[in-house]
Amino acid sequence: MRPELLAAASAYRLSGPRARLRGRSGAFRGSGVGSSQEFLDFRDYAPGDDLRHLDWRSYARTDQLHVRLFQEEVAPHVDVLVDTSASLQVHESKAWALRDLVAALLFWARQGGSRPRCLMLGGGEIADVEQLPLQGNPGLSAPRLPLRPRALRVVVSDFLVADDPGPALRRLFAGAGHAVALQLLTPWELAPEPEAAVTLCDCESGARIELSLDAGAVALYQRRLQRLCNGVRSAVLGLGGVMAQVRAEAPAVMFRRDLLAADVVEPA
Amino acid sequence: MTFTAPLGLWSLLAVPVVLWLHLYRRQLRQRQVAALFLFAPELLVASAGRKRTRLLRTASLWLECLAAAALALWLAGLSFGGGDAVHLVAVLDDSASMAAVVDGQSARDRAVAALRSAVAELPGGSRLSLLRSGPRPEVLLGPQALLPQLDDAVRHWQPTQPHHDLGPALELARELAGPPGRVLLLTDAEVPGCDDVDLRRCGVAAGNAAILSAERFTTEQGEHLRAEVRLFGAAAADVTLTLSTAAGPLGERQLALRGGDSSSVDLLLPAGTAALTLHLDDDALALDNVVTLLPEPQRIVPVGVLLPEPLQQALLLPRTLAAQTGWQPAAEAAAAQLLFAPAPGRVTDGRTEVVVAVPGQDRDTWLSPFAVDRSHPWMAGITLGGVAWSAGRGALPGRALVVAGGTTLLSEELLPGGRRLWLSLDPSASNLPRAPDWPILWDNVLAQCRRELPGPVRSNCAVGDEIEWRRALGTAGLPADLELERPDGDKRTGRGLRVVSWRAEQPGLHLVRDAEGRELGRIAVRFHDVVESDLSGASSGYQEARPVPRTAVAAAPDQGLERRLLALLALLCLLLDCLALSRRPR
């Protein structure tokens, strides 16, 4: 990782999921009783219980042995699903932001004790994030490898697809312990500057149109983009997940302004 | 709307060329986007790389099309008439012969009709200037007036002036017209030396009898009338000269004249004949058929004498005045125009006061020669030869007229209300009252007083002369408030201070009125001009101006306001297009 990215990522960690996760013992609350420091409940002592969890104060008052139950802490599986379609490299800043974002997610997963996987939408596993291939399949296709159930599943994409993203997101987040959708957009994609006549060329299909990108055209575009983003957000929230819109900028800015605000990460 | 170069309309093809360039050669800035469907899904095309692109209605397209259209119209010489408009300067010959009526129509009427016809043929937007010839050319219309104003301008035009040079009017017309303008001279005879103007002759040769001269004069027998009548052009004719006054006819004379002959008439008028009218039979030119003669006004100077009787006798004043004419004793001193007084008094109303200062013991006696200011009217004919003049040593005020040594003997003092003659003289020790210069002196003084009597300088004058009216000496400083009412009823304010004058432009009786409209007097104006009365040289025809070689710049068609505006519009469009293209984001 670049020192700049490492410094920015070190200040945060992945936020805890609302659903119970499954994985190795780690930092996240598991779906059962565990050995964490977080008190869960009392129950009567049964042979074989860990004597370290006996509540001696209760025994002194009631003369009954009770053990304190603590929340299980797990290090969840983290699957980072990366949209590697050409639209993610429509601008150099967007491609860099995608690499930074994926690298930070993997970093945060490893820091939490997980063994993350980085999978390409419609493809296989990505070995080296720095060599992230950005000529993948368009759309939100599921990876060729099976996804791990009850894992923290993060989809990084711009979600700029003409079709309804709901069905695709449901497929991607099916069986996930926690769903996080990160929509990466460039500043120009969020708020284009009005300009004179221009030829717009679709980076994936090659289609092109010529139009005067005046204030009216920009306003129309922004209304359509807002409608698309709302569709993605509704689909993710409907799946119990978290959705964050990330503006492709410097890592520290992206983490602090977009991920922290959306409760995707929390201060380390 | 005209196109002087319609082939230039082919340049309108520049407009589709601009469109073609926008369709096929337009290179817009390309931008890669991730979601083209968000911009204009309805405009998506399947394939890229086509040659023809959608025409964008940008400001640059409109500006370039507009500039191309403007340039095409500029080349085609678009004009709404302004380019062919001309400035016609018409000169109307105001000489009296233009009023001659032949076959029921005057040359003036034919000139006006010709002018209307010329104006009707002018292209739209043309302008007209109308001049009336004369010693002082007058602008009747314009400069550069609208064509419909012609009728109002010529409605009251009646040529009455005597013969005059058309040169000043033509010079003024050439100045007004300038190089691209056109000058049209409307006259009734040949005018040599004006090849550079269009000449329209509207005259018709005709015979004409005219009163060439008429005057009233007084002899010992009484007042006489002398008139001269001439027949121009016609072979022979019997002409009747009728004399009449306001009271009735005085008689008539039958004159048998041959062409070019003149006949004089000499009549003894009855005593007390007032305004006298001479009238010839009607013929082609009416102006020279009528003459009105007024009697010259009697200029009697009221004289008052306040000198003591012995001094009067010593000065031989009664005998001297008795030898003069044109004066009468004033009823009272205040009414005297010439007043002899022993001491200065109040001088008003242009009066002349003669103050005889008899010296006392302090005096000198001088013998001729004396220094005399002969430039003064009073001193005309005065020599003072052999005169012994005894005068006081004191200085006399005013302008010295007779000086001996350092002593002023006679002087004139100008006063606001009149003038004063100072005479230092001891008649008992002088022989001046018995010298021949003495009655001459008072005759001069009386003549001066007579001239200063208010009234017309001349009761009869000719067209073209100055009508002059002398005001009282005391009113010289006041503004000229006299008006002359002409025979046509028009009133003109006179110019001048002491002598108010007007130019006589119409024959007939003119009335002089004061500011309150009271009639002060009458002046008769007659027309007599041998050249104008002779209609034998009148002719008709049209002579176009000789083409004048012009410089290339002058020969070029007028660009006109429209073409300048089109050029300006094209330039503006191109500038705005450059601005729009430069501000387009790259």
Image (cartoon, coloured by chain):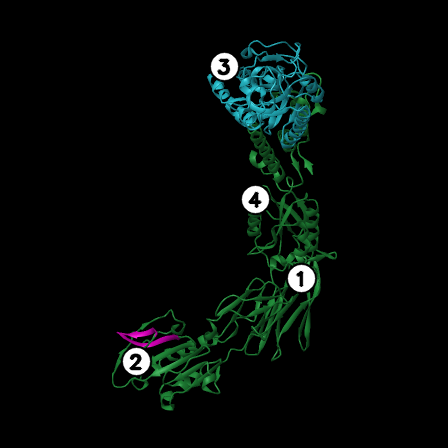
* Disc on the earlier residue, 1 or 4: 4
Circle 4 sits on which residue?
B178
Residue B361: percent from the left, percent from the top?
A: 25, 86
Circle 2 sits on which residue?
B389
Is residue B557 shown in magenta?
no
Most foreground residue, B281 or B451 = B451
Q: Residues within 10 Å of mark 1 (few under 14, many from 20)?
A: many
> In the rendered structure, which amino acid carries the disc numbered 1?
Ala
Residue A227: percent from the left, percent from the top?
A: 68, 28
| Range covered by the magenta-colored residues | B398-414
Q: Which chain: green? A: B
Q: How crowded is mark 4: few (under 14 residues within 10 Å), some or many (20 or more)?
A: few
> In the rendered structure, which amino acid carries the disc numbered 2?
Trp
Quick check: B431 above or below B537? below
For residue A86, what is the image quadrant?
top right
* Chain under disc 2: B
Distance, label 2 to label 1, CA atoms, is 63 Å
Circle 3 sits on which residue?
A1
Chief SS of the magenta region: strand
> In the rendered structure, which amino acid carries the disc numbered 4?
Gly
Is residue B399 shown in magenta?
yes
Q: Which chain: cyan? A: A
* Chain under disc 1: B
Circle 1 sits on which residue?
B209
Quick check: B95 above or below B389? above
* Disc on the earlier residue, 2 or 1: 1
Give the residue displayed 65% in from the left and 56% down from the top: B153
Distance, label 1 to label 4, CA atoms, is 42 Å
Dot in front, 2 or 1: 2
